[in-house]
């Protein structure tokens, strides 16, 4: 019987064939929390009479949201996490290393695994064909303790993506288009499986935008197949031994199927304050929209591939007067690569500023909080009211190229109109 | 305490950023202060006006976005008896049940601000006594019913030593 990718992964882990809607007790391969979800996870563990991890190698703590700490409270909470990790012999990935799920993709996630993280964008692990899903601190604490969790086997929504990306159009535009079509709750409780000739041709960092934003449609997880691209990525990360092929059967019954032809798309913009308010860059809704801050980075588009696109557009130009450009690499690895390639130099010479790796301005706790009435255009994944720390500000979402082009003009701009 | 409570109305797509804004993240470990800001970016009068036993009543996709569990914790701490919504975002839904906050997926159309509500959780019936609406809802999956009855996931694990499926 043919099965979708998520059904295959859960079936293999629980040792019998599962079907959508079933509740299963699933083993967990990796479980992590960060500086916002970690303190409550630790206090829940203590309530459970915690006296050590049975499988400490599966447990990690990341400090990424305030990186480095931004208040006395965050400094104290980070200390609590450092002390706890040290006392109980689990790995701590400290400030400056990068965003939890980005680092998980670079260093730890393996195809076919089940990964639980105390962050809604944990689903990005699906870029390596892992069933990775976000949960709250209590679920994370219990998963750390028992290395098991309960799951409802999700129905699969299959997205068949074909066609070459036109000039100025990127995987971010494809995902904004999909969320715009199905809505912010269009995939609630479900698994989004991304397949097709376009996916086959994209490298893992470009693919990862899709599973990363699966939660923006409400999905439990979003996944790409593990294939030749996955093998290449894991080899480049110096862990070729972690590769194994795994993919869904394309003839498996699924709840929903949508075809996307990339060749028909133009650059996409999500309007405030919901990720599904998506229009093309030529739409009158974004004509002459003034941009006060451009924020580049995050787990969605903070990788070296994104900053290469940005640097190519900015090279030799200046950011528009009255517009601030804030860039934040998603991890230390990205930071170092960008340093060697000179992309930070290009951004700084253009008038931008570069922050240390982490979540940066996205969660609204540091380094780029918006003023009331200001518009921000960002490569990030969500534009909810108040997201960047001020409920009186407005967040628009776009690809790195659209963000770079708009930084040069000071208004939302089609990257095809700014010669790179 | 009577099993009746008033309706506090909210719209669709209430994000966890609206329930617990990032600008209050410095209060993460200060629940008595944090609870004063519950749902403040959705409506400012909720946290100061809600009475124990009242209900949060919303449209679709309540709790979308971030996994921050404090969003569910602070709604519970305001004394709300539960959240009634047309649908929930999945991480919030698990967090709420894990903290003993009932979430009822039910058609909330027609319920007005301040309506006198009661919920029969066992029979799966919502009563709006102000306008006479009565609606049935599907019970939670058995594992969630059990976690909720035990008072949350920590209490559930304390009681059984493991998940009790």
Image (tube, coloured by chain):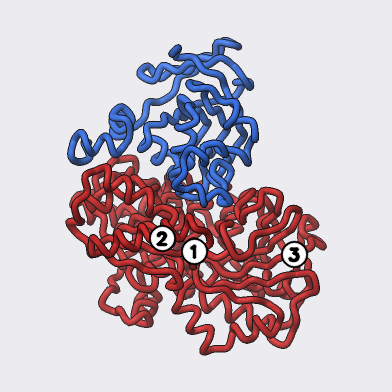
Label 3 SS: loop
Residue on which the image places disc 2: A78
Q: How many marks?
A: 3
Residue at 45% of width from left, 63% of height from top?
A: A195
Marks 2,1: beta carbons within 8 A: yes
Marks 3,2: beta carbons within 8 A: no
- Colour of chain A as rendered: red
Label 1 SS: loop
Label 2, label 1: how far apart the Cα atoms are: 8 Å
Residue A111 vs residue A167: left or right? left
Residue at 36% of width from left, 53% of height from top?
A: A252
Label 2 SS: helix
In the image, farthest residue toward the front: A72
**Closer to the camera in the image, B20 or A31:** B20
Residue at 59% of width from left, 17% of height from top?
A: B115
Residue on which the image places disc 1: A69
Residue on which the image places disc 3: A292
């Amino acid at each position: 019987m043919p099965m979708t990718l998520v059904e295959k992964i859960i079936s293999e882990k629980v040792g019998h064939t599962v079907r959508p809607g079933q509740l299963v007790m699933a083993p967990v391969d990796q479980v992590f929390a960060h500086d916002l979800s970690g303190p409550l996870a630790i206090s829940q563990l203590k309530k459970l009479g915690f006296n050590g991890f049975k499988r400490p190698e599966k447990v990690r703590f990341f400090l990424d949201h305030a990186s480095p700490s931004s208040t006395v409270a965050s400094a104290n909470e980070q200390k609590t996490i450092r002390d706890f990790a040290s006392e109980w012999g689990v790995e701590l990935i400290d400030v400056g290393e990068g965003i939890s799920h980005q680092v998980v993709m670079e260093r730890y996630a393996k195809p076919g695994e089940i990964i639980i993280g105390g962050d809604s964008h944990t689903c990005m692990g699906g870029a390596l064909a892992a069933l990775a899903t976000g949960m709250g601190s209590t679920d994370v604490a219990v998963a750390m303790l028992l290395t098991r969790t309960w799951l409802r086997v999700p129905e699969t929504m299959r997205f068949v993506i074909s066609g070459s990306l036109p000039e100025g159009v990127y995987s971010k535009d494809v995902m904004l288009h999909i969320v715009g079509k199905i809505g912010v709750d269009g995939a609630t409780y479900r698994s989004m499986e991304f397949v097709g000739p376009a996916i086959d041709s994209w490298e893992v960092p470009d693919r990862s935008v899709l599973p990363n934003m699966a939660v923006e449609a409400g999905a439990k997880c979003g996944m790409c197949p593990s294939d030749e691209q996955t093998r290449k990525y894991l080899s480049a990360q110096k862990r070729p031994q972690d590769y194994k092929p795994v993919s869904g059967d394309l003839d498996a019954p699924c709840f929903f199927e949508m075809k996307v032809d990339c060749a028909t798309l133009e650059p996409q913009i999500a309007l405030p304050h919901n990720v599904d308010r998506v229009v093309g860059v030529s739409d009158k809704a974004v004509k002459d929209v003034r941009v006060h801050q451009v924020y580049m980075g995050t787990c969605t588009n903070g990788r070296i591939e994104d900053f290469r696109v940005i640097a190519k557009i900015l090279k030799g130009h200046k950011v528009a007067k009255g517009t601030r450009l804030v860039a934040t690499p998603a991890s230390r690895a990205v930071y170092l690569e960008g340093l060697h390639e000179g992309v930070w130099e290009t951004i700084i010479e253009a008038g931008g500023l570069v922050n240390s790796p982490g979540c940066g301005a996205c969660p609204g706790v540091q380094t780029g909080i918006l003023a009331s009435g200001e518009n921000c255009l960002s490569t990030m994944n969500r534009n909810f009211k108040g997201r960047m720390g001020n409920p009186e500000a407005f967040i628009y979402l776009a690809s790195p190229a659209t963000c770079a082009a708009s930084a040069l003009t000071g208004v939302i701009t089609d990257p095809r109109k700014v010669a790179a | 305490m009577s099993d009746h409570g008033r309706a506090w109305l909210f719209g669709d797509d209430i994000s966890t950023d609206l329930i617990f804004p990032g600008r209050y993240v410095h209060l993460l470990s200060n629940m008595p202060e944090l609870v004063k800001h519950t749902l403040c970016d959705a409506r400012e009068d909720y946290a100061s006006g809600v009475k124990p036993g009242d209900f949060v009543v919303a449209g679709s996709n309540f709790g979308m976005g971030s996994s921050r569990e404090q969003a569910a914790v602070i709604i519970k701490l305001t004394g709300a008896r539960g959240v009634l919504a047309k649908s929930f975002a999945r991480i919030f839904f698990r967090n709420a049940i894990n903290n003993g906050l009932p979430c009822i997926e039910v058609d909330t159309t027609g319920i007005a601000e301040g309506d006198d509500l009661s919920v029969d959780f066992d029979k799966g019936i919502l009563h709006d006594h102000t306008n006479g609406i009565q609606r049935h809802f599907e019970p939670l999956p058995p594992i969630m019913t059990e976690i909720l009855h035990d008072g949350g996931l920590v209490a559930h694990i304390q009681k059984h030593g493991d998940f009790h499926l």
